[in-house]
Protein backbone atom coordinates (compact mmCIF):
# COMPACT_ATOMS: atom_id res chain seq x y z
CA UNK A 1 0.00 0.00 0.00
CA UNK A 2 1.17 3.54 -0.64
CA UNK A 3 1.06 6.31 1.94
CA UNK A 4 -2.17 8.28 1.70
CA UNK A 5 -4.13 10.82 3.69
CA UNK A 6 -7.42 8.97 4.21
CA UNK A 7 -10.39 10.16 6.22
CA UNK A 8 -9.70 7.30 8.63
CA UNK A 9 -6.32 7.60 10.34
CA UNK A 10 -6.52 4.41 12.42
CA UNK A 11 -8.44 1.25 11.63
CA UNK A 12 -8.42 -1.94 13.68
CA UNK A 13 -10.53 -4.89 12.53
CA UNK A 14 -11.07 -7.88 14.84
CA UNK A 15 -7.65 -7.49 16.46
CA UNK A 16 -6.55 -9.93 19.16
CA UNK A 17 -3.33 -10.14 21.18
CA UNK A 18 -2.45 -12.76 23.79
CA UNK A 19 0.60 -12.89 26.07
CA UNK A 20 1.95 -16.10 27.63
CA UNK A 21 0.69 -18.10 29.29
CA UNK A 22 -2.89 -17.10 28.46
CA UNK A 23 -3.46 -13.39 29.13
CA UNK A 24 -5.82 -12.03 26.49
CA UNK A 25 -4.71 -8.40 26.23
CA UNK A 26 -7.05 -7.65 23.31
CA UNK A 27 -9.96 -9.75 22.07
CA UNK A 28 -11.61 -9.08 18.67
CA UNK A 29 -11.19 -5.31 18.94
CA UNK A 30 -12.53 -3.24 16.04
CA UNK A 31 -12.07 0.53 16.12
CA UNK A 32 -11.79 3.35 13.58
CA UNK A 33 -10.45 6.81 14.40
CA UNK A 34 -10.83 9.70 11.99
CA UNK A 35 -8.11 12.09 10.95
CA UNK A 36 -8.19 15.13 13.23
CA UNK A 37 -10.17 13.35 15.95
CA UNK A 38 -9.33 13.27 19.65
CA UNK A 39 -10.28 9.92 21.14
CA UNK A 40 -10.13 8.89 24.78
CA UNK A 41 -9.39 5.23 25.44
CA UNK A 42 -10.32 4.38 28.99
CA UNK A 43 -10.38 1.35 31.25
CA UNK A 44 -8.71 0.11 34.39
CA UNK A 45 -5.07 -1.03 34.56
CA UNK A 46 -4.63 -4.27 32.66
CA UNK A 47 -7.58 -3.61 30.35
CA UNK A 48 -5.42 -3.54 27.19
CA UNK A 49 -4.96 0.20 26.59
CA UNK A 50 -1.16 0.14 26.35
CA UNK A 51 -1.20 -2.93 24.12
CA UNK A 52 -3.54 -1.18 21.69
CA UNK A 53 -1.27 1.87 21.50
CA UNK A 54 1.80 -0.30 20.96
CA UNK A 55 0.08 -2.04 18.06
CA UNK A 56 -0.49 1.32 16.37
CA UNK A 57 3.22 2.13 16.24
CA UNK A 58 4.09 -1.53 15.57
CA UNK A 59 6.02 -1.99 18.79
CA UNK A 60 3.77 -5.05 19.02
CA UNK A 61 2.10 -7.15 16.35
CA UNK A 62 -1.35 -8.73 16.69
CA UNK A 63 -1.97 -12.46 16.80
CA UNK A 64 -4.86 -11.92 14.42
CA UNK A 65 -6.77 -9.10 12.82
CA UNK A 66 -5.91 -6.06 10.73
CA UNK A 67 -4.16 -2.89 11.94
CA UNK A 68 -4.03 0.03 9.50
CA UNK A 69 -2.51 3.45 10.15
CA UNK A 70 -2.72 6.21 7.53
CA UNK A 71 -4.03 3.67 5.05
CA UNK A 72 -1.12 1.26 5.52
CA UNK A 73 -1.47 -2.33 6.66
CA UNK A 74 1.13 -2.66 9.41
CA UNK A 75 1.42 -6.40 8.83
CA UNK A 76 2.50 -5.88 5.22
CA UNK A 77 4.41 -2.63 5.47
CA UNK A 78 8.06 -2.58 4.36
CA UNK A 79 10.83 -1.61 6.74
CA UNK A 80 11.51 1.68 4.97
CA UNK A 81 7.81 2.59 4.85
CA UNK A 82 7.46 1.76 8.55
CA UNK A 83 10.38 4.04 9.33
CA UNK A 84 8.73 6.88 7.43
CA UNK A 85 5.39 6.22 9.11
CA UNK A 86 6.93 6.31 12.58
CA UNK A 87 8.22 9.80 11.87
CA UNK A 88 4.56 10.80 11.55
CA UNK A 89 3.67 9.27 14.93
CA UNK A 90 4.41 10.77 18.33
CA UNK A 91 4.31 8.44 21.34
CA UNK A 92 4.19 9.67 24.95
CA UNK A 93 5.04 6.67 27.10
CA UNK A 94 3.66 5.93 30.53
CA UNK A 95 7.20 5.21 31.76
CA UNK A 96 8.61 8.22 29.83
CA UNK A 97 11.60 6.43 28.18
CA UNK A 98 13.86 9.46 28.54
CA UNK A 99 17.66 9.31 28.36
CA UNK A 100 18.56 10.28 31.95
CA UNK A 101 22.05 11.63 31.21
CA UNK A 102 20.92 13.72 28.27
CA UNK A 103 19.61 17.21 28.90
CA UNK A 104 15.93 18.03 28.64
CA UNK A 105 16.61 19.83 25.35
CA UNK A 106 18.61 16.86 24.10
CA UNK A 107 15.78 14.44 24.79
CA UNK A 108 13.28 16.56 22.89
CA UNK A 109 15.72 17.27 20.06
CA UNK A 110 16.42 13.58 19.52
CA UNK A 111 12.94 12.99 18.10
CA UNK A 112 13.52 15.72 15.53
CA UNK A 113 17.09 14.72 14.71
CA UNK A 114 16.04 11.21 13.66
CA UNK A 115 13.44 12.86 11.40
CA UNK A 116 16.23 14.94 9.79
CA UNK A 117 14.84 18.28 10.91
CA UNK A 118 17.05 21.34 10.42
CA UNK A 119 18.99 22.53 13.50
CA UNK A 120 17.24 25.90 13.45
CA UNK A 121 13.84 24.20 13.55
CA UNK A 122 14.98 21.89 16.35
CA UNK A 123 16.19 24.73 18.56
CA UNK A 124 13.07 26.84 17.98
CA UNK A 125 10.63 23.97 18.45
CA UNK A 126 12.37 22.75 21.61
CA UNK A 127 12.18 26.16 23.26
CA UNK A 128 8.57 26.63 22.15
CA UNK A 129 7.46 23.36 23.76
CA UNK A 130 9.38 23.98 26.97
CA UNK A 131 7.80 27.41 27.32
CA UNK A 132 4.29 26.05 26.76
CA UNK A 133 4.86 23.35 29.37
CA UNK A 134 6.48 25.83 31.81
CA UNK A 135 9.81 24.04 31.78
CA UNK A 136 11.97 26.63 30.01
CA UNK A 137 14.28 26.81 33.03
CA UNK A 138 15.02 23.07 32.68
CA UNK A 139 16.46 23.38 29.16
CA UNK A 140 19.97 22.24 30.15
CA UNK A 141 19.03 20.01 33.10
CA UNK A 142 19.77 16.27 32.78
CA UNK A 143 16.47 14.43 32.44
CA UNK A 144 17.41 12.10 35.29
CA UNK A 145 17.33 15.01 37.73
CA UNK A 146 13.71 15.91 37.02
CA UNK A 147 10.67 15.01 39.09
CA UNK A 148 8.29 12.41 37.68
CA UNK A 149 5.81 15.11 36.72
CA UNK A 150 8.53 17.04 34.87
CA UNK A 151 9.70 13.87 33.12
CA UNK A 152 6.15 13.21 32.02
CA UNK A 153 5.91 16.65 30.46
CA UNK A 154 9.20 16.13 28.62
CA UNK A 155 7.93 12.83 27.26
CA UNK A 156 4.86 14.66 25.95
CA UNK A 157 7.01 17.43 24.45
CA UNK A 158 9.14 14.84 22.66
CA UNK A 159 6.01 13.12 21.31
CA UNK A 160 4.74 16.41 19.87
CA UNK A 161 8.08 17.74 18.67
CA UNK A 162 7.67 16.77 15.00
CA UNK A 163 4.06 17.97 14.87
CA UNK A 164 3.00 14.39 14.08
CA UNK A 165 -0.11 13.27 12.24
CA UNK A 166 -0.88 10.73 14.97
CA UNK A 167 -0.26 11.23 18.69
CA UNK A 168 -0.47 8.26 21.06
CA UNK A 169 -0.43 9.23 24.74
CA UNK A 170 -0.37 6.55 27.44
CA UNK A 171 -1.65 7.94 30.77
CA UNK A 172 -0.11 11.35 29.94
CA UNK A 173 -1.43 13.09 33.06
CA UNK A 174 -0.88 10.35 35.62
CA UNK A 175 1.79 12.31 37.50
CA UNK A 176 0.40 15.81 37.00
CA UNK A 177 -1.69 18.14 39.13
CA UNK A 178 -4.86 19.68 37.70
CA UNK A 179 -3.24 22.95 36.64
CA UNK A 180 -0.47 21.16 34.74
CA UNK A 181 -2.97 18.70 33.30
CA UNK A 182 -4.84 21.67 31.83
CA UNK A 183 -1.61 22.90 30.19
CA UNK A 184 -0.99 19.50 28.65
CA UNK A 185 -4.54 19.14 27.37
CA UNK A 186 -4.38 22.61 25.81
CA UNK A 187 -1.25 21.50 23.95
CA UNK A 188 -2.99 18.36 22.72
CA UNK A 189 -5.96 20.49 21.60
CA UNK A 190 -3.63 22.76 19.67
CA UNK A 191 -2.32 19.79 17.71
CA UNK A 192 -5.81 18.42 17.17
CA UNK A 193 -6.80 21.77 15.64
CA UNK A 194 -3.84 21.44 13.26
CA UNK A 195 -5.36 18.19 12.02
CA UNK A 196 -3.56 15.61 14.13
CA UNK A 197 -5.31 12.50 15.39
CA UNK A 198 -4.89 12.21 19.16
CA UNK A 199 -5.50 8.97 21.07
CA UNK A 200 -5.23 9.32 24.84
CA UNK A 201 -5.26 6.21 27.01
CA UNK A 202 -6.35 7.16 30.52
CA UNK A 203 -8.30 6.03 33.55
CA UNK A 204 -8.79 9.68 34.62
CA UNK A 205 -12.42 10.38 33.76
CA UNK A 206 -12.00 14.07 34.56
CA UNK A 207 -10.18 14.44 31.24
CA UNK A 208 -13.27 13.64 29.19
CA UNK A 209 -16.34 13.65 31.44
CA UNK A 210 -17.31 17.24 30.60
CA UNK A 211 -16.40 17.24 26.90
CA UNK A 212 -17.86 16.03 23.63
CA UNK A 213 -14.95 13.90 22.40
CA UNK A 214 -15.55 10.24 21.67
CA UNK A 215 -14.73 7.89 24.53
CA UNK A 216 -14.28 4.14 24.16
CA UNK A 217 -13.73 1.79 27.07
CA UNK A 218 -11.74 -1.42 27.22
CA UNK A 219 -12.57 -4.08 29.75
CA UNK A 220 -10.40 -7.19 29.95
CA UNK A 221 -9.24 -6.65 26.38
CA UNK A 222 -12.69 -6.08 24.89
CA UNK A 223 -14.30 -2.84 23.77
CA UNK A 224 -17.52 -2.18 25.63
CA UNK A 225 -20.53 -2.37 23.36
CA UNK A 226 -22.82 0.70 23.15
CA UNK A 227 -25.11 0.71 26.17
CA UNK A 228 -22.98 -1.73 28.13
CA UNK A 229 -22.45 -0.74 31.75
CA UNK A 230 -19.16 1.18 32.23
CA UNK A 231 -16.51 -0.20 34.50
CA UNK A 232 -16.94 0.73 38.14
CA UNK A 233 -14.47 3.19 39.65
CA UNK A 234 -13.61 0.80 42.45
CA UNK A 235 -12.87 -2.21 40.27
CA UNK A 236 -9.30 -3.27 40.85
CA UNK A 237 -6.60 -3.96 38.28
CA UNK A 238 -6.27 -7.45 39.72
CA UNK A 239 -9.91 -8.14 38.89
CA UNK A 240 -9.38 -6.98 35.33
CA UNK A 241 -6.30 -9.15 34.92
CA UNK A 242 -8.15 -12.15 36.30
CA UNK A 243 -10.90 -11.58 33.74
CA UNK A 244 -8.33 -11.22 30.96
CA UNK A 245 -6.75 -14.55 31.84
CA UNK A 246 -10.02 -16.48 31.60
Image (cartoon, helix red, strand yellow):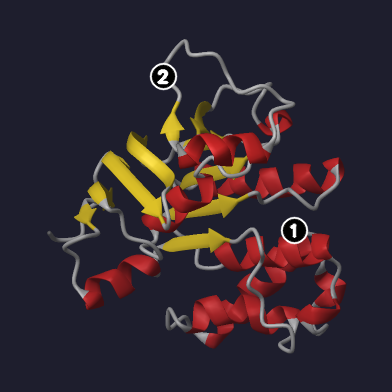
Residue at 20% of width from left, 55% of height from top? Answer: 73
| Residue at figure coordinates x 73%, y 61% from the top left | 153
**Nearer to the camera, 114 or 30:** 30
Q: Quadrant of the N terminus?
A: bottom left
Left/right placement of residue 194 relative to residue 152 reads: left
Q: Which residue, as the protein is rendered here, is positioned at the far top?
A: 227
Estimate the x, y position of residue 9 in percent, counting from the top left. Answer: 32, 45
Q: Please tell me which of labels 2 and 1 falls first in the chain.
A: 1
Q: Quadrant of the C terminus?
A: top left
Residue 207 in view of the camera? yes
Q: Is residue 134 among the parts visible in the rendering? A: no
Q: Which residue is at the front of the view, 99 or 112?
A: 99
Left-right relation of 194 to 84: right
Real-space Cα separation, disc 2 to disc 1, in angstroms: 38 Å
**Residue pushed farthest left?**
1
Residue 39 against residue 126 in the figure, above or below = above
| Circle 2: element type | loop
Apparent side of residue 143 relative to residue 163 in the rendered image (left or right): right
In this rendered view, identify the residue nearer to me: 25 or 87. 25
Q: Is residue 195 above or below residue 136?
A: above
In this rendering, which labeled residue sits more in front, label 2 or label 1? 2
Element type at mark 1: helix
Disc 1: which residue: 132
Q: Position of residue 47 (x, y in %)?
A: 54, 40
Residue annotated with mark 2: 225
- Residue 36: mark: none
Name the image quarter holding residue 120.
bottom right
Amino acid sequence: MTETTPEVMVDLIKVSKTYPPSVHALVDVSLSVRRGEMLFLTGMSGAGKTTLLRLLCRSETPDKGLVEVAGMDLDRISGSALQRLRRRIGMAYQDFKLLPRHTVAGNIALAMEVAYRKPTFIRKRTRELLEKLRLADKHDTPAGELSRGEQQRISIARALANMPDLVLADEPTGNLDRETTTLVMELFREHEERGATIIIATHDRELFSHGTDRVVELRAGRLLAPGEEPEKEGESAATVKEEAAR
